[in-house]
Image (cartoon, rainbow, N blue to C red):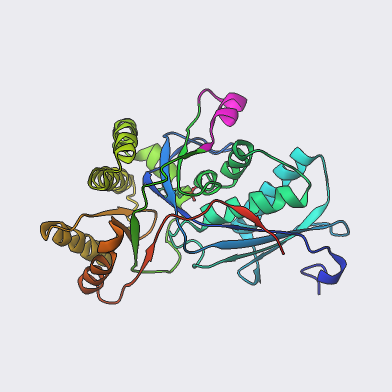
């Protein structure tokens, strides 16, 4: 065929697996689009669901990279982002061979379920291994950030803090990466309410650009996010799920407010999203600690104590019939899969 190399001519390659993460303190907006430098610090929990598996094989005969995404040749922007990322890896490794990339997401790509986070974390691990690079976790996280800022956090399991970094250019690139936040005893549940798994109308990349450029609320949110992060770290250290949830919910709603105030508005929240949010409010009225966070899509993730997860799931299903729910816990960092 003309689209890809014959597998038999290539080595087994390197396969990595990575999981998405959900930010409790959100990243929204880049101060350097080329280097993918966020405006704000963010803090996330890596999940144990929806993994991405990615295999990278070097293909010395090929003239171009082959990129298979969920079983089909990738085209357009998704393909371009992978090729640009491989160029970075080749530059670091001092090598020029093209590669064949095969990546599979357990969830629909681009549906606001952090497929770019797990995707570029897995690609960073698989591609560096395939090109013979041995990077430390910080360097790996910085590299993953170039693919997608949220991917810098999925390098690590459990909780991770992504530094927006300081300065410009190389100084910013060197200082913007994620690091683990060790919280061995904090193991909440995250009930994911899938209200719509279709692709989003506006990519998060385009949406955050528009928000930064046109939303009069953006700067206020970015400033308040600093306070949210300070409060969040203290709440996490105390293992105070109620405080963690309250801070995460206000931070996420504030982020969506900045988008709603963009010109034209970016609105990811659907009627079913709002129905789920009503369910969360009802749970709290009934004495159940449950707190919502939403990303660049209509799905809702609800933080709660693990023992409350079945009740939370049932309530969300009743609030938004037609949605589907599953319960995630903290998951592992990106790693090579040994055959
Ligand atoms: C986050 N999101 O912190 C935020 C909250 C969505 C809402 O990171 O342009 O795919 O590739 O750096 O990481 C989604 O944006 O954006 C995201 P790029 P990304 O999880």
User: Where the C terminus falls, by quadrant?
Assistant: bottom right
Q: Magenta span has 289?
A: no
Q: State whether residue 27 appears in this view.
A: no
Left or right of 69 on screen, residue 219: left
* Residue lying at the far front of the rendered structure: 185
Picture coordinates of residue 126, whole percent (x, y): 69, 54
Task: Work out whether 92 lies above or below 193.
Answer: above
Q: Which residue is drawn at 34% across and 37% down?
A: 237
Q: How many labels does the image show?
A: 0
Residue 229 seen in the current view = yes
The magenta segment: 166-178
Front residue of 134/74: it is: 134
In terms of depth relative to the viewer, which is nearer, 148 or 177? 177
Residue placed farthest to the left in the image? 285
Residue 222 location (% of width, % of height): 34, 34
Q: Horizontal and vertical percent for residue 97? A: 83, 51
Q: Does the magenta stretch include residue 169?
A: yes
């Amino acid at each position: 065929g003309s689209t890809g190399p014959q597998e038999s001519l290539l080595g087994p390659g390197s396969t990595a697996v990575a999981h998405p993460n959900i930010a409790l303190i959100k990243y929204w907006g880049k101060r350097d689009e080329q280097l993918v430098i966020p405006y704000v610090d963010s803090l996330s929990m890596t999940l144990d669901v929806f993994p991405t598996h990615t295999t990278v094989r070097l293909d010395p005969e090929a003239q171009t990279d082959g990129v298979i995404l969920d079983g089909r040749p990738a085209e357009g922007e998704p393909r371009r982002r992978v090729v640009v990322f491989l160029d970075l890896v080749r530059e670091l490794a001092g090598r020029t061979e093209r590669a064949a990339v095969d990546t599979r997401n357990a969830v629909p790509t681009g549906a606001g379920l952090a497929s770019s986070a797990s995707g570029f974390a897995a690609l960073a691990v698989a591609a560096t291994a395939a090109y013979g690079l041995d990077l430390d976790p910080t360097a790996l996280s910085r590299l993953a950030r170039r693919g997608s800022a949220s991917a810098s956090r999925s390098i690590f399991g459990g909780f991770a803090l992504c530094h927006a970094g300081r300065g410009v250019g190389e100084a910013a690139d060197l200082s913007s990466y994620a690091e683990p936040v060790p919280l061995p005893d904090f193991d909440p549940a995250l009930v994911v309410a899938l209200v719509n798994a279709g692709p989003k109308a506006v990519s998060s990349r385009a949406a955050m650009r528009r928000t930064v450029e046109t939303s009069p609320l953006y700067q206020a949110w970015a400033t308040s996010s600093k306070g949210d992060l300070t409060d969040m770290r203290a709440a996490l250290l105390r293992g105070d799920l109620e405080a963690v949830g309250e801070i995460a919910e206000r931070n996420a709603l504030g982020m969506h407010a900045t988008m709603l105030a963009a010109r034209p508005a970016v609105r990811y929240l659907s009627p079913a999203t709002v129905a789920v949010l009503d369910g969360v409010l009802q749970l709290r009225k009934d004495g159940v600690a449950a707190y919502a966070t939403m990303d660049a899509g209509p799905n809702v993730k609800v933080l709660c104590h693990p023992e409350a997860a079945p009740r939370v799931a049932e309530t969300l299903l009743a609030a938004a019939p037609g949605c589907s729910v599953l319960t995630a816990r903290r998951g592992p960092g990106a790693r090579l899969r040994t055959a």
